[in-house]
Image (tube, coloured by chain):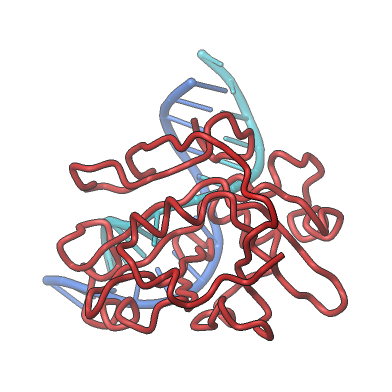
Chain colours: A red, B cyan, C blue
Amino acid sequence: MEIIGKKFYQRFPDKVARDLLGKLLVRKLDKNLLVGKIVETEAYFDRHDPASRAAVSEKWHKKMLRDVGKTFIYMVHNNWLLNIIAHKKQDAGAVLIRAVEPLKGTELMKKFRNADKLEFLTNGPGKLTQAFKIDKTFDNIPVYVEKSPLIIARTKEEENFEIIEAFRIGVKKDLSEPMRFYISGNKFVSKK
DNA sequence: AGGAAGATCTACT
DNA sequence: GTAGATCTTCCTA
């Protein structure tokens, strides 16, 4: 397991969203490790993207302008959603982590989620933050720094998979291009 | 004060 | 598979 450097996030959000598939989301919790493989993401852009927080208000726009590789967390319908800031230069942008495949620490995840079935533990943006015990206090932490409580890493051997493109879920006004990406055939994807 | 929001759960047809 | 209720935060009037 090798932590991913900051530069990785200094690209267009859709690029980063694609490349985050198959990577590991690692949550350090006391002596325990919670690990999940990222299987579904969505890209959000600057103010021209009507579904982006950046388009809502200047306050949100500012948050999305911050340094790449940091978390960006907000609540929707009583769910905390986990994003990673990703953009080029002065643009605002972020990648929403929509689903992961539970790999390690699944017993704790079941406890936090109050659910038993593996496939319902982390197959949605609000579900995975519950399973990983992520909330507002995890806002603005760098996922490229070894000592952070939440990091993103790559596996030793790159596996092969097909990436499916689709339109984003739940957004009222979407862009003309599909900005949701997921691993083909993976059963932990929130919605086929 | 009111309503919308990048969702989830439940209870049904 | 899908409709409806429901959790909180923040924006707009």
Front residue of this view, candidates A173 and C4: A173
The quarter holding residue A169 reads top left
Residue that protrudes farthest toward the front in the picture: A157
Q: Could you tell me which residue is drawn at 41 percent across and 59 percent down?
A: A16
Q: Could you tell me which residue is drawn at 53 percent across and 50 percent down?
A: A21
Q: Position of residue A191 (x, y in %)?
A: 50, 35
Front residue of this view, candidates A79 and A154: A154
Front residue of this view, candidates A106 and C6: A106
Tell me how many marks there are.
0
Q: Position of residue A140 (x, y in %)?
A: 49, 83
Front residue of this view, candidates A129 and A97: A97
Q: Position of residue B12 (x, y in %)?
A: 58, 20
A172 in relation to A4, above or below: above
Could you tell me which quadrant the N terminus of chain A lies in?
A: bottom right
Residue B3 relative to residue A133: left or right = left
A167 in relation to A36, above or below: above
The quarter holding residue A72 reads bottom left
A91 in relation to A184, above or below: below
Q: Could you tell me which residue is drawn at 77 percent across and 61 percent down?
A: A112
Q: Position of residue A56 (x, y in %)?
A: 23, 69
Residue A12 relative to residue A125: left or right = left
Residue A112 relative to residue A47: left or right = right
